[in-house]
Amino acid sequence: MTQEPELPPLTDEQLDVLRKFALFEVGREEMLRALAGAFDVDFDPKEESDKNITQRRSANNRFPIPEPGIVITREHISNALEHKRFELVSERDLVYWATILLLNDAYVFDPGDEDLIAEWLNDISFNLDAS
């Protein structure tokens, strides 16, 4: 039996970039560059039989889950919606942001609001237009 090599943990710099991404202080491309080799995400449009286009979303986390994780709170959701309201980010940016928060294992939801946060992020991720 061969043992899998141990994955390297995220660096302090990578965790800082993820914290900034959650607050819209850095964009998706900058975050993905900083996490190259540790995290990637795929937003692949897929044609369905009825000619609707759906978005397939997948991610690869190649790092051990950090302890403690980066806590996502209601304030993160509120901040994101304010950014959208003031047109500081596009609807597509908002969809990518929510999806990455759902798929990246470094993020954890505030235990007191976990269901609410998960519901909001899922609604943003799947019900807004990413095109």
Image (cartoon, rainbow, N blue to C red):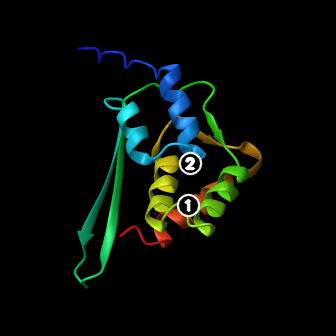
Residue on which disc 1 sits: 88
Image depth: mark 2 or mark 1 in front: 1
Left or right of 43 on screen, residue 49 = left
Residue 129 visible to the viewer: yes
73 relative to 10, above or below: below
Mark 2 surroundings within 10 Å by alpha-carbon count, few (fewer than 14), some (14 through 19), many (20 or more): some
Looking at the picture, which amino acid does disc 2 mark?
Answer: Phe
Residue 49: numbered disc: none
Residue 65 visible to the viewer: no
> Is there a contact, CB below 8 Å, between mark 2 and mark 1?
yes
Which residue is at the front of the view, 95 or 111? Answer: 95
Q: Quadrant of the N terminus?
A: top left
As drawn, the residue found furthest toward the bottom would be 50
Mark 1 surroundings within 10 Å by alpha-carbon count, few (fewer than 14), some (14 through 19), many (20 or more): few
- Report helix, strand or loop for mark 1: loop
| C-alpha gap between disc 2 and disc 1 | 9 Å
Left or right of 30 on screen, residue 18 = right
User: Which residue occupies 49% across, 72% down?
Assistant: 127
59 relative to 124, above or below: above
Q: Position of residue 66 (x, y in %)?
A: 54, 26
Q: Disc count in the image?
A: 2
- Report helix, strand or loop for mark 2: loop
Q: Position of residue 13 (x, y in %)?
A: 50, 23
User: Which residue occupies 36% across, 45% down?
Assistant: 59
114 relative to 2, above or below: below
38 relative to 72, above or below: above
Which residue is at the front of the view, 58 or 86? Answer: 86
Q: Position of residue 97 (x, y in %)?
A: 49, 53
Left or right of 111 on screen, residue 4 = left
Mark positioned earlier in the residue sequence (2 or 1): 2
Looking at the picture, which amino acid does disc 1 mark?
Answer: Leu
Residue on which disc 2 sits: 24
